[in-house]
Amino acid sequence: MSASPLPQSTRPEFAALREDFPILHQQVHGKPLAYLDNAASSQRPRQVIDAVTHYEEHDHANIHRGVHTLSQRATDAFEGARKRIAGFINAASERETIFTRGTTEAINLVAQAYARPRLQPGDQVLITWMEHHSNIVPWQMVCEQTGAKLLVAPIDERGQLRMDEFERLLGPRTRLVAAVHVSNALGTINPVAEMITLAHDRGVPVLLDGAQAVPHGSVDVQALGCDFYAFSGHKMYGPTGIGVLYGREALLEDMPPWQGGGDMIRMVRFDRTEYNDLPWKFEAGTPNISGVVGLGAAVDYLGAIGMDAIAAREQELLAYATERLLQVPGLRPIGTAAHKASLLSFVLDGVHPHDIGTIVDHDGIAVRTGHHCAMPVMEFFGIPATARASFALYNTEEEIDRLAESLLRAREVFA
Amino acid sequence: MDLKDLYRDVIVDHNRSPRNFRQIEPPRHDAEGFNPLCGDKLHVYLRLKQGVIEDISFEGSGCAISVASASLMTEALKGKSEAEALTVFERMHGLLAGSDDNIGDPTELGKLAALGGVREYPTRVKCASLCWHTMKSALTGTATATTE
């Protein structure tokens, strides 16, 4: 392979940030780890790890309950984080920011507490062809429960939503649009503002799956005007097991609780229970307090760097990776939308994605291989799986060079 | 660990040119195997004559390990009795996933021993074992095998 014409433009400010991530400084199979599986889960900076450790070592108790000092500290840490997380996505109030286990649980919450009581037989829920299974199956389940129908807006050969079809499928029986903001399998950034306008013009509310969007650019739920927005902590440098459902207050107020239990009630008697206010109405049971503390630290971390700076840096990495990997003979990118987030899904002639995964792992490089929980996308492109390199703020051009070299070796193994 | 221990020449060869990659017309035994984790799909066909595997073949798509394992399996089992095939199944299970003390003598497995490198790659064991579970399903009359 010829040397890349692109400059080695690893920016010093981002090179320094790499030092914040202790896990990156290790060897795998005797090579420096190149972690390119960020769309599956990103790594935690020291600031997040320290915040969680500090909480565990000094402040942990159950929240909203005790009058003792630790309980108050834990409650302050938890609700303080909620306030900052609500601010991070510009929610109008922290009452609109509900903690869940992750994006999946957030979507299930909307399916069961918003859609299920409203859907009538013959009503329709509209999704897109590029959804993650977590934005397909909850709707299939609620359609099964209510007799509603699931409609799927198709995509084109580049992996972009066909807006004409999306608009055509928005009909008089559409009760909800549930769409991915950024596709995890293709990288496509959907034109969500336009989609929301089309849906709202017809009085249809919109849920966005933002799991792959929030880590990679500025998200302002009020500017978007979406009705629900779901995302996960562990894809944005926070802990696993914590996520957020943003919902417009008027809609959330109108929804019955999803799960019953402690913390979601104001008063319980055997003949009658009064539910708590938002957001606690949807947070039954002791929540993932340390997860919330960690996610709060993650949004502080991201806020200090600036989401626009991160987005710009990741676009550099994407451009470099696209150019570099396309020089690998036999490599075909899957998902070539005009607007893409920083991930590259691809197949390689004569080398199955799983073999790619094992071979590049030998060179210390972590990529995801498989169907990426988006089997309909794989079916659309007529492939069983892809390999996917997905980038975060700490990745470097040098890591992308190493991936390109490793892919050449993969071809040699099977030559 | 050298990659060559996993991708031995015989595996690369059988992946590039899978043997017995075809259907067998009925009457036949057959079963589908599916690895939901990676999307590998195999269909194994076999024809029995008086308890002996007269012909065995497969179709499907998968990684090099999965295709080579299926191809090597068809070569190894042709002409074997049902009981012998199930014994080889057990031996392969030991080779791919077993503990060190029940591998037995890999040289008795002939070419199949080339799959032994998979042991060092826990995430890839299912790739190699899918066809074997599918073959067992075909023999014992279960329609679908899965490695999940």
Image (tube, grey):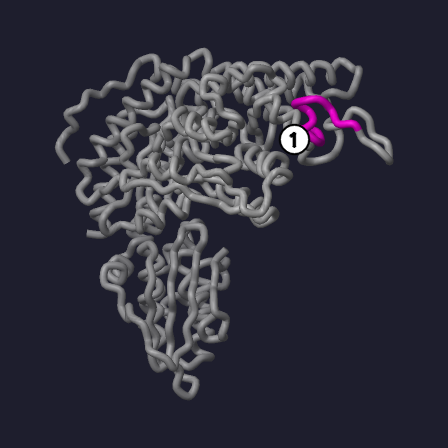
Q: Horizontally, is A122 left or right of A282 in the view?
A: left
Q: Is residue A239 magenta?
A: no
Count of numbered labels shown in the rendering: 1
- Closest to the observer, B114 or B34: B34
- Dividing the picture into quarters, in which one does residue B51 lie? bottom left
Q: Residue at x 49, y 63 (%)?
A: B102
Q: Which residues are magenta?
A: A274-287
- Residue A278 in percent (x, y) is at 67, 22
Q: Secondary structure at mark 1?
A: loop
Q: Amino acid at mark 1?
A: Met
Regarding residue A410, the answer to whether it shows in the image is yes
- Residue A227 in percent (x, y) is at 53, 26
- Dividing the picture into quarters, in which one does residue A195 lie? top left
- Dividing the picture into quarters, in which one does residue A239 lie? top right
Residue annotated with mark 1: A255
Q: Residue furthest right?
A: A270
Q: Residue at x 49, y 59 (%)?
A: B98
Q: Horizontally, is A145 left or right of A410 in the view?
A: right
- Closest to the observer, B113 or B83: B83
Q: Residue at x 67, y 17 (%)?
A: A58
- Residue A238 in percent (x, y) is at 51, 25
